[in-house]
């Protein structure tokens, strides 16, 4: 299926010159002279090699047809995440680097959407938000304004997050899995 260069976004799998690439980042560049183009950072799925390609915004590229299936996260083993197909009970491994930063938010038993190309798992989509416990939070500094200042905190998975001053250690919060940012206090 062909898509325009301006429709490319992280997580999309492209088929170029007989190879599969997963898009890591995309930036639109508008030089002073000439037309705008999309600078796309992507990784070859088979070899793991990173590359940056430039596509004119009017260009079309081939998007690989991927099958999607719901799978349950079981455990991390080294640098691989193991998932189980909920219908066939078959287990699949996906390298953590293909999942990217959101891999830190995988929890035992979490159901995710795994993308497969010809039966080989390539990546997975986590839920947009997860509830995590704050295991460390700096104390409030007197005189800080509550409207614009955030303090550092540490989540149960070890990730650092900026949180509002009124949030304390032990609080359960909602975190955006795409970028690891604080959204709100979890409703218990």
Image: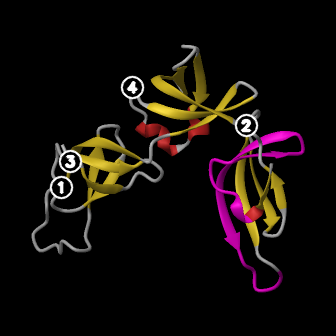
Give the mark toward the camera: 4 or 2.
Answer: 4
Instruction: Answer with mark 4 or mark 2, whichever residue precedes in sequence.
Output: 2
The residue indicated by pointer 4 is 108
Q: Quadrant of residue 34?
A: bottom right
- Establish if 89 lies above or below 42: above
Q: Residue at x 90, y 45 (%)?
A: 17
Instruction: Answer with mark 1 or mark 4, whichever residue precedes in sequence.
Output: 4
The residue indicated by pointer 1 is 167
Closest to the observer, 172 or 112: 112
Residue 187, x across and y down, in percent: 20, 47
| Label 4 element class | loop
Label 1 to label 3: alpha-carbon separation: 13 Å
Label 4 to label 2: alpha-carbon separation: 25 Å
- Establish if 53 lies above or below 111: below
Local crowd at mark 2 within 10 Å, few (<14), some, or many (≥20)? some
Label 3 to label 2: alpha-carbon separation: 39 Å
The residue indicated by pointer 2 is 45
Closest to the observer, 185 or 103: 185
Instruction: Answer with mark 1 or mark 3, whichever residue precedes in sequence.
Output: 1
Q: Residue at x 35, y 50 (%)?
A: 175
| Label 3 element class | loop
Q: Is residue 22 magenta?
A: yes
Mark seen at residue 187: 3
Label 1 to label 2: alpha-carbon separation: 40 Å
State the extent of the magenta-drawn residues as a range: 6-34
């Amino acid at each position: 299926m062909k898509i325009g260069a301006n429709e490319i976004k992280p997580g999309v799998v492209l088929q170029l010159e007989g190879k599969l690439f997963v898009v890591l980042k995309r930036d639109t560049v508008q030089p002073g002279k000439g037309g705008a183009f999309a600078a796309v950072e992507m990784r070859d799925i088979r070899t793991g090699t990173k590359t940056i390609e430039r596509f004119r915004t009017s260009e079309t590229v081939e998007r690989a047809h991927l099958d999607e299936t719901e799978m349950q996260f079981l455990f991390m083993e080294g640098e691989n995440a193991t998932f189980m197909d909920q219908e066939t009970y078959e287990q699949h491994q996906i390298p953590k680097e293909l999942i990217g930063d959101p891999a830190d938010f995988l929890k035992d038993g979490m159901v995710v959407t795994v993308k497969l190309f010809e039966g080989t798992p390539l990546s997975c989509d986590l839920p947009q938000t997860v509830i995590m416990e704050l295991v460390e939070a700096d104390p409030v500094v007197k005189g800080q304004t509550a409207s614009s200042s955030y303090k550092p905190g540490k989540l149960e998975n070890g990730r650092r997050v900026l949180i509002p001053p009124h949030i304390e250690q032990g609080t359960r919060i909602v975190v955006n899995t795409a970028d690891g940012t604080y959204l709100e206090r979890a409703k218990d």
